[in-house]
């Protein structure tokens, strides 16, 4: 039992913004941003006009919010010094989501240069060119587009059902990799910040990463971002190896862990994926092949032979060259619901959408512009309906390397 002396000398419990409720944290954030706008507007007033402002509007944003909390929440303990920690707490909880600005002129120029006139294909260029930071901005913009598409597909489906029937879910297919992981995080955060979405069915397009220390790159792991407490979600995972020997591929598709995923792939409405560049250390396919070479399971010249075949990039571990998809250039094959030709056909179906993030590498900021160009100019590789990239990559594909 604590003695009176110990009680007297005991330190008071330190206040932590993480202990506050979502309701209060969000209210502080909302009030703070509004107050910033009022303060900025008041600074443009003439001195005589400023003198006539109410006393409350003459305070700084933090002081004003602190006074508001005292008056309306009964929290005199939340002084202005504690407003900023609450603001950062709001960001930590996903209540603050910045929307990256777009560069329409660059997007229009890309469409014109590569003669993309199909009205069902959309190019978005995010005004960001800071390497790996730009990758996050591209993913954020892609996620916002996906949210809009989910709502669009939901309305289209709802218009076809009879009154009283259950709301049909929207099926979202997710590929593996760091970029798609960022998209999934952003979508989930938008839901957590108040965006209402219809029931979703999440499909894993591939098994995902193979590195034991990078499980977050596998779709089955970032499905967990969609907390069942705030969203009606069903998951269709793909339990199998990332890459298998070609001669085993047809058998693998019939296994219990994969059969159901392949049977349901036609239900997918929106496909989210990214691309990887050849000759790049963070490309998952390249890393996997290198690991097999080190384990002496593949010929040491496997990668060299793939480069000689014209390998320039891959989508969902499926390699391609300037001329189109590459087949039989490697003795192993990725287990994916859609081969490149199938993905091209999928993107051309009414009501089906493929959102392709094409920014820089999210881990090192390296450009993927050489791998992106064939996806713009080759009809055999136009597998996207929505392509999102950054300003640096856009300028590189328009004007060459900077």
Image (cartoon, rainbow, N blue to C red):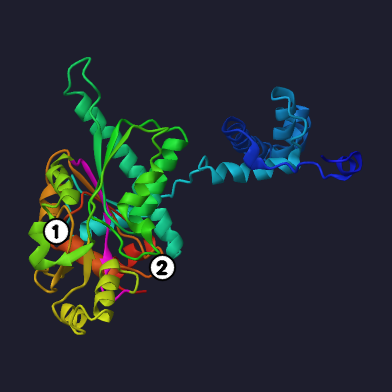
Q: Position of residue 373 (x, y in %)?
A: 22, 66
Q: Position of residue 244 (x, y in %)?
A: 17, 65
Q: Position of residue 336 (x, y in %)?
A: 18, 56
Start and end of the magenta stretch? 268-280
* Pointer 2 residue: 365
How crowded pointer 2 is (Cα within 10 Å; few <14, some 14-19, many 20+) is rated as some
User: Could you say which is closer to the camera, residue 185 or residue 348?
Assistant: 185
Q: Against 89, is 300 above or below?
A: below
Q: Residue placed farthest to the front in the image?
A: 1
| Separation (CA) of disc 2 from disc 1 | 26 Å
The mark found on residue 340 in the picture is 1
Residue under the point 38% across and 41% down: 226
Residue under the point 18% across and 59% down: 335
Q: Quadrant of residue 369?
A: bottom left
First along the sequence among labels 2 and 1:
1
User: Could you say which is closer to the camera, residue 382 or residue 154?
Assistant: 154
């Amino acid at each position: 039992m604590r003695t009176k002396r110990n009680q007297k000398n005991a330190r008071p419990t330190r206040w932590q913004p993480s202990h506050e409720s979502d309701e209060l944290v969000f209210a502080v954030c909302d009030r703070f941003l509004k107050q910033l706008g009022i303060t900025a507007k008041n600074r443009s007033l003439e001195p005589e006009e400023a003198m006539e402002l109410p006393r409350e509007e003459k305070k700084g944003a933090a002081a004003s919010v602190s006074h508001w909390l005292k008056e309306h929440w009964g929290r005199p303990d939340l002084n202005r010094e504690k407003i900023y920690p609450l603001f950062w707490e709001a960001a930590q909880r996903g209540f603050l989501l910045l929307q990256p600005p777009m560069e329409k002129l660059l997007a229009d120029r890309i469409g014109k240069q590569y003669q993309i006139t199909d009205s069902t294909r959309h190019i978005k260029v995010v005004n960001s060119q800071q390497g790996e930071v730009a990758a996050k901005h591209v993913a954020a913009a892609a996620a916002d587009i996906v949210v809009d598409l989910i709502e669009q597909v939901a309305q289209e489906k709802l218009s076809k059902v009879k009154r009283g029937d259950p709301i049909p879910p929207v099926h979202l297919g997710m590929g593996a990799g760091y970029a798609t992981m960022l998209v999934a995080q952003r979508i989930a955060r938008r839901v957590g910040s108040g965006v209402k979405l219809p029931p979703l069915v999440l499909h894993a397009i591939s098994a995902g990463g193979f590195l034991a220390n990078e499980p977050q790159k596998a779709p089955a792991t970032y499905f967990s971002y969609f907390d069942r407490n705030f969203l009606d979600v069903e998951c269709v995972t793909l339990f199998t190896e990332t890459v298998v020997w070609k001669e085993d591929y047809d058998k693998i598709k019939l296994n219990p862990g994969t059969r159901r995923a392949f049977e349901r792939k036609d239900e997918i409405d929106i496909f989210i994926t990214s691309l990887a560049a050849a000759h790049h250390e963070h490309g998952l396919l390249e890393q996997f092949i290198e690991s097999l070479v080190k384990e002496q399971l593949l010929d040491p010249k496997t990668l060299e032979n793939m480069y000689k075949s014209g390998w320039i990039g891959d989508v969902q571990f499926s390699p391609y060259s300037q001329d189109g998809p590459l087949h039989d250039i490697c003795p192993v094959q990725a287990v994916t619901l859609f081969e490149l030709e199938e993905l091209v056909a999928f993107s051309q179906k009414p009501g089906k959408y493929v959102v392709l993030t094409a920014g820089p590498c999210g881990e090192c900021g390296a450009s993927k512009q050489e791998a992106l160009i064939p996806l713009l100019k080759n009809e055999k590789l136009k597998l996207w309906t929505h392509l999102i990239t950054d300003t640096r990559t856009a300028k590189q594909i328009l004007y060459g390397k900077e």
